[in-house]
Amino acid sequence: MTYEAKLRVWRGDDDGGELRDFAVDVNDGEVILDVIHRLQAEQAPDLAVRWNCKAGKCGSCSAEINGRPRLMCMTRMSTYDEAETITVTPLRAFPVIRDLVTDVSFNYEKAREVPAFAPPKDLQPGEYRMDQIDVERSQEFRKCIECFLCQDVCHVVRDHEENKKAFAGPRFLMRTAELDMHPLDTLDRKDMAQEDLGLGYCNITKCCTEVCPEHIKITDNAIIPMKERVADRKYDPVVWLGNILFNRTK
Amino acid sequence: MVEVERHSYDVVVIGAGGSGLRAVIEARQRGLKVAVVSKSLFGKAHTVMAEGGCAAAMGNANSKDSWKVHFADTMRGGKFLNNWRMAELHAQESAERVWELETYGALFDRTKDGRISQRNFGGHTYPRLAHVGDRTGLEIIRTLQQKIVSLQQEDKAELGDYEARIKVFAECSITELILDETGGEKRVAGAFGYWRETGEFILFEAPAVVLATGGIGKSFKVSSNSWEYSGDGHALALRAGSALINMEFIQFHPTGMVWPPSVKGILVTEGVRGDGGVLKNSEGKRFMFNYIPPVFKGQYAETEEEADQWLKDNDSARRTPDLLPRDEVARAINTEVKAGRGSPHGGVYLDIASRMTPEEIQRRLPSMYHQFLELAEVDITKDAMEVGPTCHYVMGGIEVDPDTGAAATLGLFAAGECSGGMHGSNRLGGNSLSDLLVFGRRAGLGAADYVRALSSRPTVSPAAVESAAELALVPFTGPQGTAKPENPYMLHSELQQTMNDLVGIIRNETEIREAMAKLEEYKVRFRNIESQGGRAFNPGWHLALDMRNMLLVSECVAKASLARTESRGGHTRDDHPKMDSEWRRTLLACRAGGNDPVVPEVTVTKERQAPMREDLLAQFDLEELGKYYTDEELAAHPGRTEELP
């Protein structure tokens, strides 16, 4: 069942690079990452690629396959025609380090800008009580494996480096929604989502949801509800008047 | 003079999985300045792959549960070879550690009354595993990661710098511990390594190092482990003069995927069986009823009806033998396949489809559902999975003081999978995540106390740094003279095949000796290893450096396996099939020696196991202990003394 696949892989570093053609054997049931590993073992020993679990759980092996952001470990070769040339390139929204490895530090910087979980101060460990139905909303978002495919595909930053400063990206807007929906979180996160994390930049094209390997409904379940809550607050005339009359900031 | 980036910290934690991150949190909360060094990106460590849950006797699902029951289950699971003190601390503290995670923001699945839900697992008397569907490890690592971020936010507010007290050095590998030998006694002075991204060298000057590097599974071909599991901490500790114990005990998880070949070994959570899934052979028979070993007779259901009744109500029947400890289930599967009752791809069937509705399967086991659908084109809500044993966990590791995690080398601490003793000869599922939390915290505390008590800081000698740097660059030079250059990928692949075939799930003297001969050959060939390309993000070079550790650790596994002439837990000898009470109180300690600093010679010596404290021993009845202990050891048991006139 072995055949020889045609692979076109981007090789280079921050100074530039090019697509190189390779022919690599493929066995039954293999995924892109298997083929990249074979390429590495037999033809290109210094080919840089990130990976860990090889089971879709760690989110390390993100790349663009034929231009589409994917996990290499979860993309079966059988998805493609045997005669087709498969192009593998690094994530486009992040600076290249080498070959398929990019500098994803943007994401770790944004993670620090989301204020941490803030439980009620008097609640002791072991005393937390929450209903399953109430934790499920946030649990969906906690399935996130931080592969950063959503960050990569999001057009707010994909072709607009200048937006990175003001925009946290789908991953961290979702993190804010997750904390906002946590039954025991005490912070009001609506204003920070809008003002500090750039919620307003998102115009709900749902690209993030499409590429999410965990099938999290990022746009529908996280971002849109956050936008609605922000809208309630900002444009509700009663709230607006109350804020002015009682000098409320939140 | 070699160019090296230098940093100074109070504590350096090597490894950013569950135990490493918990150690960081503890040391930081004691006011120390901590570096955490990780081969991967932050949040990708192997903990992320743990599926089923985290064992803690909270008693939420059955109020009869207590730390004493958990302790006893752990000792039984390890065939009483466990370090009893570690098992005691673990059972006593794991509930607190889980509750603490909720204060960091973890969201476990809930019971009807809003507490943390607990599921059944192999070897645990009561439903005990706190879980989040089948992605518990992800929840735990993300929670710890986010706790560290929150501590960094506090530091930023107080000191103006996120990294004032905790800095994460991601994609950075440590190749050598640096010791200070000037005071007459060797003590830790720092750690030397390289940035994976640039290949440039980095030196941490620190009086205390916590090893939290995980396991050794990447030396085996069929493994559920990631590339990071090259036994770095095991090897660093050996070379620094500390000992490893129990290295012959390797856990083969009974249920790894077997097909397609490229995913062979990927884990299928025990939670499938915990939630009601059953093992069947090619004849459709639930074969586990035939494999209840004498030591567990009477503790497990003997008919399908009884096993199914237990699933509905734990208190009215005995548990299903599908949930025997992992060593027993893995051997049973192995035997079924050898007897010709296996599945088409050399495994057995794991059936959840006929036991639960499709909706419930998708809700309780979402990762398994996707894993099989996407990687094997099997819909587990309709068809049975094919599964077989996969190298999953090493019970052996660095010998440590149970209370502080201190290794023999001054200033060196270890926690989690790279430490040894806690799980004895076989770990129960769910006891790993709890182990990480309990002993990660204790090692962080131990390191903090050690640093605070120091009167003088150790120093790093320039010569030690020079030689570490020189050694790290050897692979680029390639072989001396006319020797054939070795491709690191090929050498690694041969090592994996050898360990898998010759020191795998079933062992014997002839095969182990064959493996040892091969390991000697690999050590020679390792001298000729050649890495092509430059130093920037070069996986071929990284693997060459990791091979040094894998060879050393593999030799420990092989030599200890040869020395232990009995079968127990994760060590099965078909030439010594019986469990031997004399061996129960004997530990095998591996130490590094000889004249080769690159891959030292391993020596194995017998050590006496510390006897269990009497009040704990009295928890077990004499009849059960008689299956494991020598007569002499039980002379003081209350059950025995009462019989006397």
Image (cartoon, coloured by chain):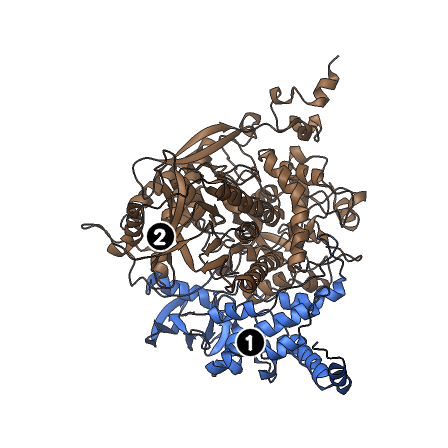
Chain colours: A blue, B brown
Q: The residue tagged with tag 2: helix, strand or loop?
A: helix
Image: B534 above or below B2: below
> As drawn, is A116 to the left or to the right of B357?
left
Chain ID, mark 2: B
Which residue reaches farthest top? B645
Nearer-the-camera pick, B559 or A83: B559
Q: Is residue B77 visible?
A: no
Kindly indicate whether the residues beneath marks 2 and 1 are on one polypeptide chain.
no
Query: Looking at the figure, which quarter contains the N terminus of chain B?
Result: bottom left
Mark in front: 2 vs 1: 1
Q: Which residue is mark 1?
A: A169
Residue in front for this viewpoint, B13 or B637: B13
The secondary structure type at the circle numbered 1 is loop
Find residue B545 and name its label.
2
Image position, residue B281 (x, y; %):
63, 50
Q: Is residue B390 left or right of residue A175?
A: left
Q: B600 or B162: nearer the eye?
A: B162
Q: Hey, which quadrant is residue B628 in on the image?
A: top right
Measuring from the top left, give residue B208's x and y in whole percent.
46, 45
Q: Amino acid at mark 1?
A: Gly
Task: Assess whether mark 1 and mark 2 are in contact (beta carbons under 8 angstroms).
Answer: no
Q: Chain of mark 1?
A: A
Where is residue B166 shown, x and y percent of the image?
50, 57
**Could you say which quadrant of the image residue A184 lies in?**
bottom right
* Residue at x 65%, y 55% (from the top left corner): B101
